Image (tube, rainbow, N blue to C red):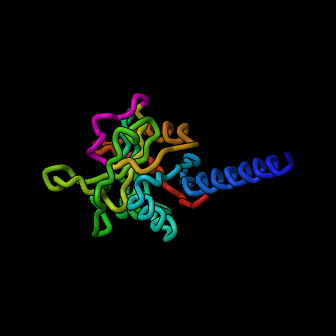
Amino acid sequence: MIKRLLTLFCCAVLAGVATAQDSVATARTEVVIETTEGNIRIALYNETPVHRDNFLRLVDEHYYDSLLFHRVIRNFMIQAGDPDSRHAEPGDELGNGDLGYTLEPEFRTPQIVHRYGSVAAAREDDDVNPEHRSSACQFYIVTRRRGTPHLDGLYTVFGEVVEGMDVADRIQRHITDDNDRPVYDVRIVRVRRE
């Protein structure tokens, strides 16, 4: 009897260790985007490793620190990551800056789609980018409550907001110019791993 109880106990402990290892293996890396409007915490998907790792490398290099949310469309999305926004003057047209490389698309539909709070990679239009390759640095956060399903399979979703959608919603309500740039700059102060 004691031998059976000991065997059951050992099996239960091993099952618990295996479960703990599985959850560690699938844990998502989180980063905090500190903005002039407040903080946004995002979790990066393990299912999109190329985009996740590229984003984390840029975070570790402090690339995003002091960039602007340069494109804001109410009830659609807020976009950041253009290197030209770091020292942009008021009224400068932004959105064309890049790092000289692009990323292979990592579409994971129907599991990962454009929901409210999704974080996705921006990219150039189909006429110059028929392969749907992602920008290496520009990303957007979906602020439309019903999501943006028309973008599924066209833009790579690589994370989601887990805290701070109130901040993203506040950013989307900024008054913008004819190029969708906020009239009053909304700046990323810094981005850091959690």
In the image, what residue occupies the spot 50% across and 68% down?
62
Which quarter of the rendered picture does the C terminus lie within? bottom right
Would you identify the image quadrant in which residue 150 lies? top left
Q: Position of residue 92 (x, y in %)?
A: 31, 56
Residue farthest along the top direction in this orientation: 146
Q: Which residues are magenta?
A: 145-155
Which quarter of the rendered picture does the N terminus lie within? top right
Residue farthest along the front direction in this orientation: 1
Q: Is residue 128 above or below residue 115?
A: below
Would residue 159 appear left or right of 22 to someone viewing this image? left
Dominant SS in magenta: loop
- Can the viewer see residue 125? yes
Residue farthest along the right direction in this orientation: 2
Q: Is 140 covered by the magenta stretch?
A: no
In the image, what residue occupies the spot 51% across and 44% down?
161
Would residue 18 appear left or right of 79 to someone viewing this image? right
Q: Position of residue 102 (x, y in %)?
A: 28, 63
Q: Is 149 covered by the magenta stretch?
A: yes
The residue nearer to you, when weighing 108 against 79, is 108
Q: Position of residue 148 (x, y in %)?
A: 34, 35
The residue nearer to you, when weighing 84 against 50, is 50
In the image, what residue occupies the spot 55% across and 47% down?
40
Q: Is residue 194 above or below residue 186?
A: below
Residue farthest along the left direction in this orientation: 127
Would residue 121 appear left or right of 18 to someone viewing this image? left
Q: Position of residue 147 (x, y in %)?
A: 39, 33
- Can the viewer see residue 34? no
